[in-house]
């Protein structure tokens, strides 16, 4: 369970923690201007693969959503991997851009922002 003061959202399930944040693309590098309480960094792992590193560990990931802000391009984001028990817990996303009906892994540029919203169970019991 995360060791910080939290304010619960209105949910049907008790003990839910929400972590939201964003970062600006930097090509084949870690995202810059990362904001969001509970997020320590958003690191570049491989082409189109970004790891959202968390300040705290959580028992269970309930939901993860990522979107890319860009004026014209179409992007798809999917959860690629998670490890909530690592020394630095993380949720990893794969970012793909659509072109001519095909998806390809793509690194984000400085004109693109990755937004993430993560929902965790923050208690051992439901």
Image (cartoon, helix red, strand yellow):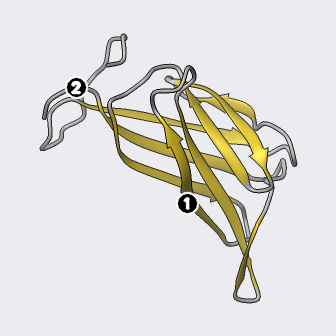
59 or 48, nearer to the observer: 59
Residue wearing tag 1: 78
Image position of 123 with respect to 98: above or below: above
56 or 70, nearer to the observer: 56
Instruction: Give percent across and percent down for residue 18.
Output: 37, 34
Residue wearing tag 2: 123
Q: Is residue 76 left or right of residue 27?
A: left
Q: Secondary structure at mark 2?
A: loop
> Residue 57 is drawn in which quadrant?
top left
Image position of 56 with respect to 106: above or below: above
Dot 2 or dot 1, earlier in sequence:
1
Instruction: Give percent across and percent down for residue 89.
Output: 52, 28
- Which mark identifies residue 65? none
- Say which residue appears at 60% left-offset and 51% top-offset: 93
Report how many numbered discs are placed on residues in the image: 2
Q: Residues within 10 Å of mark 1 (few under 14, many from 20)?
A: some
Residues at marks 2 and 1, CA–CA distance in whole angstroms: 25 Å
Instruction: Give percent across and percent down for residue 112.
Output: 75, 53
Instruction: Give percent across and percent down for residue 14.
Output: 15, 33
Q: Is residue 88 left or right of residue 108?
A: left
Image position of 59 with respect to 65: above or below: above
Q: Secondary structure at mark 1?
A: strand
Q: In which quadrant of the rendered image does the C terminus lie?
A: top left
- Say which residue appears at 68% left-offset and 72% top-offset: 74
The residue furthest bottom is 100
- Say which residue appears at 59% left-offset and 45% top-offset: 92
């Amino acid at each position: 369970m995360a060791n910080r003061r939290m304010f619960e959202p209105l949910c049907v399930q008790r003990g839910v923690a929400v972590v939201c944040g964003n970062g600006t693309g930097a090509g084949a590098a870690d995202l810059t201007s990362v904001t969001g309480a509970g997020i320590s960094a958003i690191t570049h792992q491989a082409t189109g693969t970004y790891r959202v590193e968390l300040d705290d560990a959580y028992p269970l990931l309930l939901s993860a959503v990522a979107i890319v802000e860009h004026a014209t391009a179409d992007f798809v984001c999917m959860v690629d991997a998670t490890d909530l028990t690592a020394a630095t817990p993380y949720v990893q996303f794969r970012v793909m851009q659509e072109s001519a009906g095909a998806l390809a892994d793509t690194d984000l540029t400085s004109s693109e922002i990755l937004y993430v919203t993560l929902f965790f169970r923050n208690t051992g019991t439901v």
